Image (tube, rainbow, N blue to C red):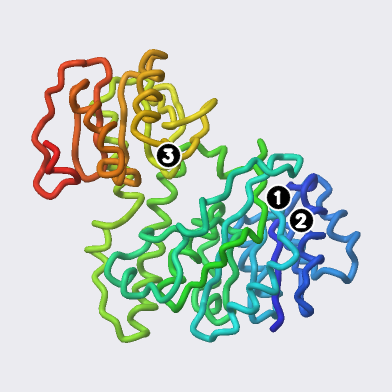
Amino acid sequence: MRVSIVVNNHNYRPYLGACIDSALNQTQPDVEVVVVDDGSTDGSVDVVRAYGDRVVPVLKTNGGQASAFNAGFAAATGEAVIFLDADDLLEPSAAATAARLLADPQVVKTHWPLTVVDEAGAPTGALKPGPARELPDGDLRATVFQRGPTCLLSPPTSGNAWSRGFLERVLPMDEALFRLGADTLLFEVAPFAGHVRRWCEPLSRYRLHGGNRWRRLGFDEILRRQLAFYAACVPVAARIATEQGVAVDPARWLEHSWWHRLQRAVRRVEEVVAPGLSYLLADGGRWGLVPSATRRPRPFPGRAGVYWGPPADDRHATSELERERAAGAAAFVLAWPSFWWLDHYEGFVRHLERSYRCAARDDCVVVFDLQAPTPRTPPAPQGSPSARRT
C-alpha cells in the first residue's frame, strides 16, 4: 500500500525541515511525501525546493488549512493519507502502522496518541489528547448514528491516517469555514463511514510553541468556530448515514453535542461565579478554558497553570482543594467530563457538601462556593448526575 504524507505548511520554516525529514524517514517501503506551502512569506519555499524530487511540492497562494488539505489530497496518489502539520513530527513506523491497519477495507481511519514536545523537540511527559485507552476503537456507527458528531475523542491532525475512499467522500471541504481546524470535519465524520482503529503507541510528536495559531485564538473564538464546524459536519454525516440506508435525526444530535454542552456549561459557571474571581476547574483537561479578564479558571489539580492528572485519592483531592482555597480560589467547578469523581472520590465529595454551599448542579457542572462555608445545597434537577447525593 502506498501511503501519502501530506505536509501542510504556512510560515513554519523553523520546523519544516525536521517535519519533512520525519516524513521521508519512514520504514514503510512505498511512501509519497507531498509538501503543500500555503503562501508562506518566511522562506519556507526555499526549504521545500531544497528537497528536489524527494517530495512532491505544491506551492500555492495563501488560502488556509482546508485549502492546503484540498490541494495536497488532489496531488496525493496513496491509498492511505496522513495529513501532517509542519510543526509536528512522525515516528518512523507511523506510515507502516497506518498501512497495516487500513489494509482492512472496512477501516476508514486509524489514530494514535501524540507525544507532546516543547519548541526544541524535547518531550514534556504529556500525551495528546491523552492515554491511548481513551481513544475510540472499532465500529462506532451505532453510537454516532444516535448521538451525532462530537461524541467521540480524536487526536489532532498529525495523529490520524485516512483511507483514500473515505477522503474522496468528504473532500474538497469548505475552504472559507475551515481556514483553521480543517481536521475537525474529517475526524467528526469518519466514524459515520466505517471502522476506526486505535494504535496504542504514540506515532507522532505534537510541538508546543508560541506560534501555534489555533492555541492563540482564545477560548471564546475557538468555541464560536467549533459551533460553526458542528453545523457544517452535520449534513455531511447525515448524508453518509443515508448512503448506508440509515435514517438519522440530526435535531436530536444537539442533545449530545460536546460544543453546545460546553457553551451551556460556561454560561452556567458565569451565572454563579462573579466576574474576575479565580475558581478551580476539574474538567480532566478537556474544556480548553483559559483565563481572561472576566474568567479566571485554575486547572484542578494543577501545577503552574497546567492540569496535573486526577487526584491520587480523597486525601490528596481535599488537601489540594484547601491549599487552593487558601491561595484565593473562590469556587470549585466540577465539569461533566469529570463527573466520575462523584463516585470515585466519595470522601472528597462529602467534604465539599459538608463544608461549602452548592451554587449550581445540573447535567453540565456542579459548582461549590468556597467563600460560603454554610452548605445550602439546592435540589438536583430530575435525572441530573448525582441526584442521589442531594
**Residue wearing tag 1:** 87
Contact (CB < 8 A) between labels 1 and 2?
yes
What is the number of the mark on residue 310?
3
Compared across the picture, whether 14 is left or right of 260 comes to right
Q: How far apart are marks 1 and 2 (CA)?
A: 7 Å
In this view, the residue in front, 159 or 211, is 159
| Residue 220 visible somewhere in the drawing | no
Q: In which quadrant is the N terminus drawn?
A: bottom right
Name the amino acid, label 1.
Asp
Q: Closer to the N terminus: mark 3 or mark 1?
A: 1
Sequence-first tag of 1 and 2: 2
Residue 325 appears left or right of 206: left
Is residue 95 shown left or right of residue 222?
right
At mark 3, the secondary structure is loop
Query: Disc 1 on helix, strand or loop?
Result: loop
Snapshot quadrant of residue 252? bottom left
Quadrant that contains the C terminus: top left
Three-letter code for the amino acid on which mark 2 is drawn = Cys
Q: Name the residue under label 2.
A: 19
